[in-house]
Image (spheres, rainbow, N blue to C red):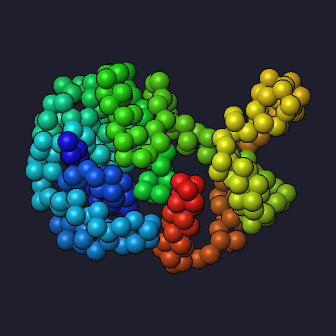
Amino acid sequence: MTRTVAVIGSGLIGRAWAVVFARAGCQVRLWDPSPEVRAQLPDTLAQTCTLSGDDPAALANVTICDDMASAVEGVEWVQENGPEKLEIKRQIYADLDRLAPPDAILASSSSALVASSFAKGLAGSHRILVAHPVNPPHVVPVVELCPSEDTAPEAMDRAEALMHAVAQVPVRLSREIDGFVLNRLQAVLLAESLSLIEQGIVTPEGLDDTICHGLGRRWTLLGPMATINLNAPGGVIDYLDRYGPTMARLSDSAARGEAFTDTAAERVAAAMPPPEEVPERTRARDAKLAALAQFLKE
C-alpha cells in the first residue's frame, strides 16, 4: 500500500523532506501558506533534487496543495516545518489537530521548541512529537524523535518505523530535553571552539581543519562511543580507566556559555568568506554531502 504524507511549510527543510518521502515512494502533499512560494515549488524542488543527485522523476509523487485541509486529508504522517515562533507553532498545531485524520502522526521539524510547548491541551497531544532533522535531511539522514510527556509510545513506534522505511536514521529519545541531543553536543563543541579561537590558541581555519580532517573523519564512520571502544585494547572500560581522569580535567576546564561573545564572533567572521557567498557555498556543501551519502551507501 502506498503511504501518503503531508509536508507543511516549503522552505529549505520542507522541500528536503518532500524529496525524502517522494524518493521512498510515498505520495506527498506539500503546502506552504505563501502563494508565491507554492508557485515556485516545481522549480525549487527540481533544484533540490539536482543538487543532491536524486532522480527528479520522484517528484511525480509530490502534489502541491492550495490549502492545509487538502494537504492533510487522508494522510498517515504530517511533517511540519513552520517558523520557530511559539505562538505560530501553537496555531499550526491547533489547525493540524483539527484537520488531520485522528490517527495521523503530527511531527515537527523544530530544532528549538519541545513538543509540549505547542501540543499541551490539544485533544491529539498523544500523537504529536518532534522529528528533528539535520539540515539538509535529504542528504544527512539522522532524525531525532523526541516525545512530550503526552506522546503515546505507539506514536513513537510508528514514527521510528516510518523513518526507517524512508531510509532515514531515527534516534529515539526517552523524554524532552532542551536542544535534544545533537544541538546539545554541538553547543558544547562550539563553545570550546570559540574560546580557543578568542584566546588566540588556534585560528578559525585551524579549528575547522582539526574537525574536518581529524574528529570529523573519524566520526563519519563511528560515533564517539564506538570510537573510544576501539581506542584502548580492552574497550570502553579500559579507555576510561586510562584516559578518564585526563578527559575529566579537560572537560572541567572547557568553555561553556561565556564563550559566545561578540569578540569571538568578529574574529571568526573575519576569517570566513563574505555573506554573499553563502548561497553558492551552501549548494557546494550539499553536493559534497550527497556524494558522501552515496559513497557510504556503496
Which quadrant would residue 258 be assigned to in this image? top right
Quick check: 72 above or below 64? Answer: above
- Residue 293 in sight in this render: yes
- Residue 36 in sight in this render: no
Disc count in the image?
Answer: 0
Which quadrant would residue 168 be assigned to in this image? top left
Q: Residue furthest front?
A: 298
Quadrant placement of the N terminus: top left
Q: Position of residue 251 (x, y in %)?
A: 78, 35
Q: Position of residue 24 (x, y in %)?
A: 33, 52
Q: Position of residue 272 (x, y in %)?
A: 65, 71
Q: Position of residue 220 (x, y in %)?
A: 64, 51
Camera-nearest residue between 266 and 164: 164
224 relative to 290 in the view: left or right: right
Which quadrant would residue 123 be assigned to in this image? top left
29 relative to 150 in the view: left or right: left
The residue positioned 78% from the left and 63% from the top of the image is 206
Quadrant placement of the C terminus: bottom right
35 relative to 225 in the view: left or right: left
142 relative to 23 in the view: left or right: right
Quick check: 185 above or below 283? Answer: above
Quick check: 138 above or below 76? Answer: below
The residue positioned 28% from the left and 67% from the top of the image is 57
